[in-house]
Each structure stands twice: as C-alpha cells, then as structure tokens.
Image: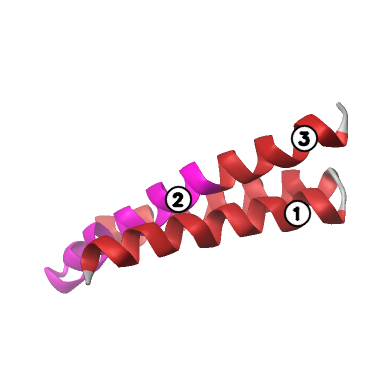
Amino acid sequence: MSAALLLPLAALAGLALGIAHFRTLRWVSDLLIQGRLAGIGVQIARLAVLAVFLWLCARGGPWTLLAGAAGLLAGRALILRGVR
C-alpha cells in the first residue's frame, strides 16, 4: 500500500481508536471504583487493542507509526475538550 494512502488511514484509525480508548476510560474507572472486577478485564482489553494497533502501525514504518500516534493524541484531545 502506498504511503500516500497509508498515512492518512493510520491517522484516521488512530483518531477513531483514540476517541474510543479515552471515552471508555471513565467507564473503567467507574467499574473499578465500584469494586467490580470486570473493570480489570475491560482495562486489559483496552490496552491490548491499543498495543495491536500500534504494532500494526509500526509494521508500516516510522511515519505510519507517527501518524497513528498523532491520531490517538488527537482523539484524546477531543475527549478531554468535551470533559472540561
């Protein structure tokens, strides 16, 4: 796949994953505060999905990894802006 297509795709996927990842953080926090062990499973799943995404981006090269990470950070910024 060409870099002209791969970089924007990684950034958009990172944005979507960042929004989902940081949106579920409150849910995990609430589960853990309530003492529900399901929160640990959800947290492990969140981190596993994030690790697989970053691994796939790394296989595409350093610029693809950077684009994916930038998308994640943009998703985080969007979620934090909504919380504040």
- Does residue 22 belong to the magenta stretch? yes
- Does residue 62 belong to the magenta stretch? no
Relative to 70, say whether 57 is above or below: above
Label 1, on which residue?
A: 65
Q: What type of secondary structure mainly makes up the magenta span?
A: helix
Which span of residues is magenta-colored?
A: 15-37
Say which quarter of the image contains residue 80: bottom left
**How far is the residue under mark 2 from the one under mark 1?**
21 Å
Q: Nearer the viewer, mark 2 or mark 1?
A: 1
- Front in this rendered view, residue 81 or 20: 81
Say which quarter of the image contains residue 83: bottom left
Q: Is residue 9 left or right of residue 75?
A: right
Query: Which sits earlier in the primary sequence, circle 2 or circle 3?
Result: 3
Query: Which sits earlier in the primary sequence, circle 2 or circle 1?
Result: 2
Relative to 46, say whether 25 is above or below: below
Q: Secondary structure at mark 3?
A: helix
The residue type indicated by label 2 comes to Ala
Q: Secondary structure at mark 2?
A: helix
Label 3, on which residue?
A: 6
The x and y percentages for residue 39 are: 28, 60
The residue type indicated by label 1 comes to Leu
The number of discs equals 3
